[in-house]
Image (cartoon, rainbow, N blue to C red):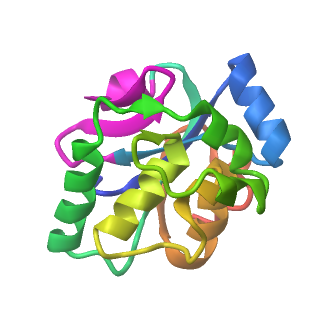
Amino acid sequence: MQPADVIVSTTRAGKSGVIRVGTDSPVSHAALFDGGGMVIEAIGEGVVRRGLAVALAEDVLAVVYRSPKITDGIASAIVAFAASQVGKSYDVLGAVLSVDPILCRVIGARTSTFFCSQLVLESYRRGGLPLTNAPSQCVPPAGVVDIAQDRLTYIGHLLGSPSWFPTVAP
């Protein structure tokens, strides 16, 4: 894996199931690999930086994507922005509203709190490689998978089988 790789994942937890059903997606979470064996992600405790093994401990599926347009400088800028957000609160309301194309815009581009896919997409935007024209607060984890199909390269499965994630062609 390389700095700024995007990881989408899911667990068997009830909250993950609700997200997957609500977004009609096989994934419920998105995170960034920082290149040093750590992941930066927005979870219930807020934006955190923690080891990859810890971040994946409860996952049953984890898939890695990379932008074919990424450079070392852009990757550094993406990771630096994400790292600068560590300690900020998790945005529960933003996560809920992210699935509604109108209501998600009501919350605006708040950067005092983040939900998982918002952190990933805002980090890419601030790093100089926007992955979508949509506001980052309007893209749930399922949207990251949609973006990946058009703008990211499939790197591989960290957990689970490609048959669990049939939209990805290895």
In the figure, residue 5 lies in which quadrant?
bottom left
Q: Position of residue 151 (x, y in %)?
A: 52, 77
Q: Determine if residue 151 is in view.
A: yes
How many numbered dots are placed on residues in this image?
Answer: 0
Instruction: Check residue 54 for magenta coloring.
Output: yes
Instruction: Check residue 44 for magenta coloring.
Output: yes
162 or 86: nearer the viewer = 86
Residue at position x 22%, y 71% from top? 74
Lateral position of residue 52 relative to residue 166, left or right:
left
61 or 147: nearer the viewer = 147
Q: Determine if residue 63 is in view.
A: no
Q: Position of residue 72 (x, y in %)?
A: 16, 70
Q: Is residue 125 above or below residue 37?
A: below
Most distant residue in the bottom direction: 69
Residue at position x 43%, y 74% from top? 130
Q: Residues in magenta?
A: 33-56
Q: Is residue 165 above or below residue 144?
A: above
Lateral position of residue 30 relative to residue 89, left or right:
right
Residue at position x 57%, y 64% from top? 170
Q: Is residue 139 above or below residue 19?
A: below
Q: Position of residue 132 (x, y in %)?
A: 55, 74
In the figure, residue 129 lies in which quadrant?
bottom left
27 or 110: nearer the viewer = 110
Residue at position x 36%, y 58% from top? 123
Q: Is residue 35 above or below residue 12?
A: below
Lateral position of residue 162 relative to residue 72, left or right:
right
Lateral position of residue 88 relative to residue 133, left or right:
left
Q: Position of residue 55 (x, y in %)?
A: 40, 27
